[in-house]
Amino acid sequence: MPRYFFHFVWPDDAVRDTKGVELEGLEAAYRHAIGLVHQVRVRFSDADDDWLIEISDETGGKPLVVLPSIVPVFGRRRPTG
């Protein structure tokens, strides 16, 4: 199984994932990243959406970026505008 890495990136900083997670493929990596977005929103409910999750694979390629602003929020309203 391929290993995917989930890097949290802000405009002026980043937290690089050095361990990664073995997953079945890119779709599973996307679902994992969506779960991470939800975890961040629960733990840091007042955080802005000025960050993203950059998914990379074992080769160092970066096949996908997940923007928190496009992930639906369940259970509370997001401010608009």
Image: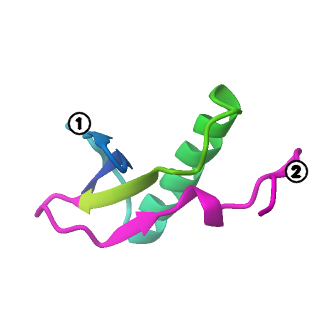
Coloring applied to the structure: rainbow
| Secondary structure category for the residue under label 2 | loop
The answer to which of 23 and 44 lies nearer the viewer is 44
Q: Earlier in the sequence, mark 2 or mark 1?
A: 1
Residue in front for this viewpoint, 74 or 81: 81
Quarter-wise, where is residue 25 in the image? bottom left
Q: What is the chief secondary structure element of the magenta stretch?
A: loop
- Is residue 30 visible in the rendered structure shown here? yes
User: Dot 1 corresponds to which residue?
Assistant: 19
66 drawn magenta: yes
Which quadrant would residue 41 be assigned to in this image? top right
Question: Residue 43: x percent and y percent?
Answer: 64, 26
**Identity, as a three-letter code, of the amino acid under mark 2:** Arg
Extent of the magenta region: 57-81
Q: Quadrant of the C terminus?
A: bottom right
C-alpha gap between disc 2 and disc 1: 34 Å
| Residue at 48%, 63% in the rendered image | 66
